[in-house]
Amino acid sequence: MHIPDGYLSPQTSGVLLAAMTPIWIRASQKVKRTLQARNVPLMALGAAFTFTIMMFNVPIPGGTTAHAVGGTLVAIALGPWAATIAVTIALVVQAIFFGDGGILAIGANCFNMAFVLPFVGYYVYKTIASRINPNPRYKWLAAGIGSYVGINAAALVAAIEFGIQPALFHTAQGVPLYSPYPLSVTIPAMTIPHLLVAGVVEAIVTAGVVAYLQRSGEPLFNQGRKQVDTARSVDTAAQS
Amino acid sequence: MNTRTLPDWLTKTEQFTLPKLQTKQRKTDGFIEKTLAGISTIIEEAVFSQKYANLPGLLQAMDARFKLISVLALLLAAGFAHSIGLLIALNVLALLMALASRIPLTVFIRRVWFFIPLYTGIVVFPAIFSFITPGKPLLSIGSAIITEQGVKAAFMIIARVGASVSFAVLLVLTTKWQNLMRALRALYIPQTFILTTEMTYRYIFLLLRIVDDMHLARKSRVLQRTSGSENRDWIASRIGVLLKKSQGLSEHVYLAMLSRGYTGEARTLQPGKAGIADLGVLSFSLLVLVAVIILNWY
């Protein structure tokens, strides 16, 4: 889903960058207010974690593998605003240092994967977990459904961004300047693989992680402090 | 040596053959090798990127802030160009800049042009046919018609992606990552964001090492066949462990920062002054951008 430079017009990238700017400002205000000075290391490790999730190859039927994005998982663990910051930083590092996604397209990639994906995924998860089925034993199911909807929403938005290019940007002779495929092609081309494969992998991984954390008695949403308290008590117990 | 002192079983010269490795049986475990290879590639790329940053070349001598803005101007030029001729000229310019920066051409071309024709070429291939890009027919293959507009669109996107990747690669190969991070200040990006990104870059390698260890441990301990669902459960549990490790680590890092005097305000060294070369390359890049925009009208 990482869009490279050259597929979107600079105008499209510019509009999406402008759309992301107030979201980033709001996210940083929210995160700063909640976490104060500890926001820097928590966001940094959250971003490093987001980057690392994509390195896990998940075996899928047929002998091949796929990888998860983890946007909804990070939103469940840190909150949706913090997830926006963490995923943005991971995307910036991927684009600048590893050539994964374009530099001009950072606004578009962040809009899709750092805003649409975690927010849609998180609020679907929250709605199911708190209203439809409040039984905490089934939170893993809500997380799986949330992540499935989240990644498919992000794929649909990316498909729309690709699909509007030939209609908006072409030469007088009708040569498309950027992505040449119309909406009638980009929407099925992006959504069908995500509905059938990528979304399923995302759901399996997210639900699996939430189920594991529940089994091991770890809180789903926390901001680091509890781990250190637990680590300290373990250290103290070991020393005594 | 007196062989009579050795036990009988040790003196026997019995032929023993190890059981053959059943590759088909281990097929489901290929994800471990793939993940390990992916991690190696990331680390290799990070080390490789810094290899050319110390050479005495044109771009290496530049202040990172001016270089970043110059590259952004050139990326915009590649984005705005409306003709294949302009895009080819930008690709040639990137090649000349690589030569002036003493980056071996084979390295540069392999890095830029190895995947683009493959990946982008496959993606845009159907666009050459009339059912995607209608226009003047060039060639008919059965009922499929290749159009002039379709071929031009395919070439244009390949050349545009090529030029964009070239300028991005030049930036990464000729700049130390610490300087590149600080250069983001020139774009009015908040200092806290830059500090967080710097920390992210460092801790990515620590987390990658943990993931590498997890996979190596699994690979060295599991001998029998494991099912797909079992493997997926294992991956989910490892991601859960990594999440908790990263959150715990962030708190330890925060306490370490506090103990070293961190008050919540990020501070960095003052940037240096720009030289003539910095202003020269920046002016040239902005000129290229303006020229591309003007030439689009003709």
Image (tube, coloured by chain):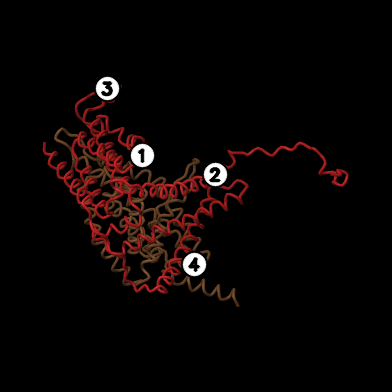
Q: Looking at this view, is A27 or B209 the one in front? A: B209
Q: Nearer the viewer, mark 1 or mark 4?
A: 1
Q: Which residue lies furthest to the bottom in this view?
A: A240
Residue A193, image x, y percentages: 38, 43
Could one spot residue A1 in this view of the protein?
Answer: no
Residue A155, image x, y percentages: 33, 48
Residue found at x 12% / y 41%: B294
Residue ID for mark 3: B140
Which mark, by number, is residue A218?
A: 4
Separation of residues labelled 2 and 4 (CA atoms): 30 Å
Q: What element carries label 3?
A: strand
Q: The red chain is which one?
A: B
Residue ID for mark 1: B104
Q: What element carries label 4?
A: loop
Evaluate whether label 2 is on the same chain as label 4.
no
Q: What element carries label 2?
A: helix
Q: What element carries label 1?
A: loop
Relative horizontal placement of residue A120, taking residue A166 as reference (left or right): right
Q: Which of marks 3 and 1 is in front?
A: 1
Q: Quick one: label 3 or label 1, which is nearer the N terminus?
A: 1
Q: Quick one: label 2 or label 1, which is nearer the N terminus?
A: 2
